[in-house]
Image: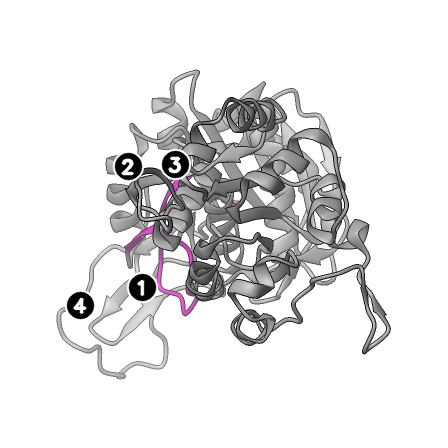
Amino acid sequence: MLNNKNIILGVCGSIAAYKSATLVRLLIKAGANVKVILTADAANFITPLTLATLSKNPVYTKYFEEETGVWSNHVELGLWADYMIIAPASANTIGKMANGLCDNLLSAVYLSAKCPVFFAPAMDLDMWKHDSTKANIQKLQEFGNVMISPNSGELASGLHGEGRMAEPEEIIAFLIGTIKNNLPLAGIKVMVTAGPTYEPIDPVRFIGNHSSGKMGFAIADQMAELGADVTLISGPTSEKTSRQIRKIDVMTAAEMLEACKSSFTQSNIIIMSAAVADYTPAQVSLQKIKKKDEEFSIALKKTTDILLTLGQLKTPEQILVGFALETTNEEENAVYKLKKKNLDLIILNSLQDAGAGFKKDTNKITIFNRAAEKTTYGLKSKAEVAKDICTAILKLYKA
Ligand code: CTP
């Protein structure tokens, strides 16, 4: 969830500022890019050097660094961030945020940021209970900012009660949970097929194809990025996924059919990008076939068309997406497959297009919807193409 995300961590003057070192470490470990802004008071509790070393970025404390002459542009910083976390958020900074005051870099960046803002209050019991603090927090929540509630326990004053900043691990868990729940496909089950199938001839030989699985893996990754619960059914490929995806490895078209049938009913969106063999040897020799004759032929039988089978089982609530790889009469063939297989969308790849097709890192697609209306896209990386495909599916799903 946090991988490659740009995060601004604002640290206020509070004894809990010491926990920001662990927080930065955990964010970095989760793959985030972190920039820290300290208020002047916060720098009394934790050194900029500690946080700069952990975040691998310079730490910002003021608009203008006299020693280096560097100007810290609050607007640029605000726009850079995918998420802003203010932890610890002192009563003073919460008050400034609630009332639009910006007399330091942190509050100016807060006012410039367009991203979701999380704040983890830290203060003494009576400050936390004060009506003024309560009113300010309510205002921030009305602005859409998300509070990570403080815990109860021993406070710096020696008093016991509410006001202790949430632990860094709790902050990270809260952040990931909230981001996940707000993603457009949170709670949606997606099934993706990818790669080739291998149809065995004998114990050492098979009939396969050049599919690398790159497109299907990119789609599965993108669907997971959108918050979906993804099952990836993959033929033999060297592709890897870094995301939390349930991967089912299969070899043959028959195995892929079985895996698809068992995941299909519980899937909301089904994307069939695998290059499934249309024919398989009628007999598989148990022993390695020896070379004898000048000519040799293998009897083949048709495999089950998985997409066609699923198209017949599909409910109106499910979205079924197929691919068409064509070399001639591309658009006509794609629309024919769309109708015949009862699809909601079909993605056409033409091998006539330079840069499109097997084993390449790029692809060029045309998408047809149920009404056979087409959208064409330029040549892009497979990751970009996956984004286009997922955007088209998302639009249809939310319609
Ligand atoms: N497909 C499938 N099962 C098969 C063959 C194809 O599920 N046995 C799916 C592919 O995953 C793809 C779509 O059907 O989403 C179209 O595949 P393609 O090979 O382009 O077309 P076919 O329907 O097999 O027709 P043809 O080979 O005659 O072009």
Is 125 on the left-hand or right-hand side of 102?
left
For residue 125, the mark is: 3
Mark 4 or 3, nearer chain start: 3
The reply to whether callout 3 and callout 1 are in contact (CB within 8 Å) is no
For residue 352, the mark is: none
Residue kind at label 3, given as amino acid type: Leu
Is 387 on the left-hand or right-hand side of 66?
left
Mark 3 or 2, nearer chain start: 3
- Please tell me which residue is depicted at 69% across the width and 50% down the height of the picture: 106
Check if residue 245 falls in the magenta segment: yes
Residue kind at label 4, given as amino acid type: Ser
Residue 62: horizontal and vertical position, in percent?
75, 61
Q: At numbered mark 4, what does the secondary structure look like: helix, strand or loop?
A: loop
Quote the CA–CA distance across marks 4 and 3: 78 Å
For residue 263, the mark is: 2
* Residue numbers of the magenta segment: 227-249
For residue 298, the mark is: 1
Q: Is mark 2 within 8 Å of ligand 1?
A: no
